[in-house]
Each structure stands twice: as structure tokens, then as C-alpha cells.
């Protein structure tokens, strides 16, 4: 049996949006691949990977391609902590990164789900 496979050109090129934090640093972002997520969990190890709060907070590093032109390479928990410390120097970095990720990396359905989830959480917290 013979198969003919034609590869179409990918017209949805991955973009790397950038934000500028309050310190004037340009932070280049990237959409994490599945392999990035798996590597991240492997770096965290079994114990930290089960800590949902830690995973959620630390996962911001997966979105960072570079800070002020310096590539961000994550090979250890120490690298994760150092990257977060670099982001903490600016009071607006986290908010701008998450907003840019939502705007650039989520499709419309994912955005609606996120809005609905936040509305539910806000309702629960207000009662």
C-alpha cells in the first residue's frame, strides 16, 4: 500500500509578542509547547509537581523567551526561582505577561472559559 502525503505550508506562524515592564525591560514571550510543559514538570520533580499552587505560580516561566534580550533557559528549580525573582523587580511584569498570554495564545473558546471561571471564583469569594 502506498500513501501520498502532502505537507501544507504552515500559515499560522508562531509569533513572539513582547511586553515592556515598568523598568523598561522588553520581555519576549512564547507559547509553550507540550514538550516545554513536560520538561517543566520533570524539572519540578514528583513532589513539587503535585503542589498545584506552586505549579500555577511557577508556570509563568514557560511563557518567557527572553528578558531584556537575554534568553531564559530553564534547566532547574533554581532557574525557575531566578526567573521569577527577575520578574518581581518590576511591579507590573506578571500582570502584563499573563494579559499578553491571554491575548495572544488563547483562542476565543479558551478566553470565554477563563472569563467564566474567574466570574465563578469571584462570586464564591464575595459570599
Image: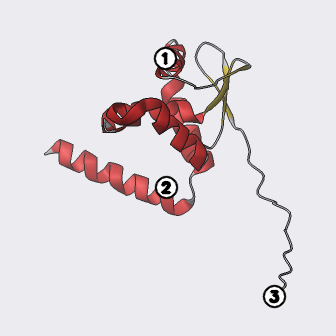
The image quarter containing residue 67 is top right
Q: Classify 39 as above or below 73.
A: below
Q: Classify 36 as above or below 3.
A: above
Mark 1 sits on what residue?
A: 78
The image quarter containing residue 15 is top right
Callout count:
3
- Find numbered disc 1 in the image and state the secondary structure of the residue it sits on: helix
Whichever of callouts 1 and 3 sits on the residue coming sooner in the sequence is 3
Disc number lying in front (3 or 2): 3
Residue plotted at (36% across, 36% down)? 46
Q: CA distance from mark 1 to mark 2?
A: 32 Å
Residue plotted at (84% across, 75% down)? 5
Mark drawn on residue 111: 2
- In depth, the one of 44 and 83 nearer the eye is 44
Residue plotted at (66% across, 17% down)? 25
- In depth, the one of 23 and 10 nearer the eye is 10
- In depth, the one of 92 and 48 nearer the eye is 48
Whichever of callouts 1 and 2 sits on the residue coming sooner in the sequence is 1
Q: Badge 1: few (under 14), some or many (20 or more) residues near its Cα, within 10 Å?
A: few
Mark 3 sits on what residue?
A: 1
- Find numbered disc 3 in the image and state the secondary structure of the residue it sits on: loop
Q: Position of residue 111 (x, y in %)?
A: 49, 55
> What quarter of the picture does the N terminus occupy?
bottom right
User: In the image, 49: left or right of 81?
Assistant: left
Q: Classify 114 as above or below 40.
A: below
The image quarter containing residue 47 is top left
Amino acid at each position: 500500500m502506498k500513501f501520498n502525503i502532502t505537507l501544507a505550508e504552515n500559515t499560522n506562524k508562531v509569533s513572539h509578542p513582547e511586553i515592556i515592564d515598568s523598568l523598561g525591560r522588553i520581555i519576549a514571550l512564547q507559547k509553550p509547547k507540550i514538550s516545554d510543559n513536560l520538561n517543566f514538570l520533570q524539572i519540578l520533580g514528583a513532589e513539587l509537581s503535585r503542589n498545584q499552587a506552586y505549579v500555577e505560580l511557577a508556570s509563568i516561566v514557560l511563557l518567557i523567551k527572553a528578558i531584556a534580550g537575554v534568553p531564559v533557559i530553564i534547566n532547574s528549580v533554581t532557574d525557575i526561582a531566578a526567573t521569577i525573582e527577575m520578574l518581581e523587580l518590576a511591579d507590573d511584569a506578571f500582570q502584563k505577561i499573563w494579559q499578553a498570554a491571554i491575548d495572544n495564545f488563547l483562542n476565543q473558546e479558551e478566553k470565554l472559559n477563563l472569563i467564566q471561571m474567574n466570574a465563578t471564583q469571584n462570586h464564591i469569594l464575595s459570599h
